[in-house]
Amino acid sequence: MLAAIFRLFTITLGTLIVTGLALLSIRWAGLRQTHSPPVHPWYSLSTWDFRQPTPEENCNKEREIPTDGIAWLKVFYKDGRWELSCEGVSLSLADKIAQSQQQNWLIEVGSIDLGPLDDLIKDLSQFDKNKNFAIYSSSQRVARYLRKKSPQWLFAADAASLVRLHLFSSMGIETILEFWPDFVLQFPDDKVTSLSPREVQELERRQKRVIVLPNSGR
């Protein structure tokens, strides 16, 4: 009986040692990789100051959005075009961007359907020469589709990407994870977007930005 218990103990111990060495090897391999920041004007900025326009600034065609910081607009697909959410007013995203002097825009996509995304690409790409865009979507399918079609834009991390980061980090192998988004928006009291110091360190090593939002950031 004692011999059987000892044999089981040694097998378990050996398995743990081999597993631990394998994880250390994987982590080390990831740390050897080098990373460069995306080629995008925002990476020349010391801080990314996201600002959500007031309803009046957002929906009034005559009211300009402040040009300092980065304007954060949530858009929806309605009646065959991408629009801002404005009560009693129909205002297209393309019209709002065209009439604004603001150069930097974070577009939050309020749709999980892939069908209308080509229209969104058309609306934004016409301004690529003089305006800078980033995309935030809760749907990884939406974000990856837009990334494939418009790699010149930046992309915020979706929930699925962050869950994978947490999983790999819990095993100590976050260094080997393929983390494709360019930056992370940390919302207050949101466990999914909450990052551990080790996760933040890894993202910074990869030249990713981590933006901690104030309580009014959503």
Image (tube, helix red, strand yellow):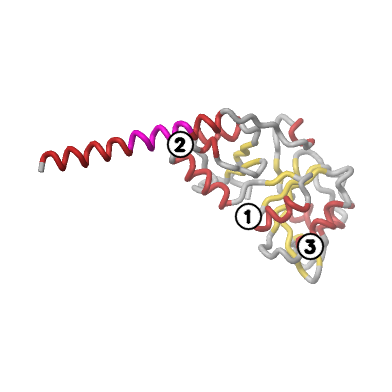
> Where does label 1 land, which residue?
140
Spatial CA distance of label 3 from label 2 is 42 Å
Q: Residue at x 52, y 47 (%)?
A: 164
Q: CA distance from mark 3 to mark 1?
A: 19 Å
Q: Residue at x 87, y 57 (%)?
A: 95
How far apart are the two marked residues, 1 and 2, measured between alpha carbons?
A: 24 Å
In the rendered picture of this protein, how many numbered marks are placed on residues?
3
Residue 201, position as x, y percentages in the image: 55, 31
Q: Are marks 3 and 1 in contact (CB under 8 Å)?
A: no
State the image coordinates of residue 57 (x, y, percent, origin top left): 79, 52
Snapshot quadrant of residue 81: bottom right
Give the numbered dot on residue 82. 3
**Disc 3 residue type (three-letter):** Trp
Tag 2: Cα neighbours inside 10 Å, few (<14), some, or many (≥20)? some
Residue furthest out toward the bottom: 79
Three-letter code for the amino acid on which mark 1 is drawn: Gln
Quadrant the N terminus occupies:
top left
Amino acid of disc 2: Gly
Q: Secondary structure at mark 2?
A: loop
Relative height, residue 159 to residue 34 (above, below): below
The range drawn in magenta is: 16-25
N-terminal label among 1 and 2 = 1
Which residue is nearer to you in this view: 1 or 65? 1
In the rendered image of this protein, does residue 193 appear above or below residue 89? above
State the residue at coordinates (16%, 41%): 5
In the image: residue 13, left or right of residue 199:
left
Q: Is residue 19 magenta?
A: yes
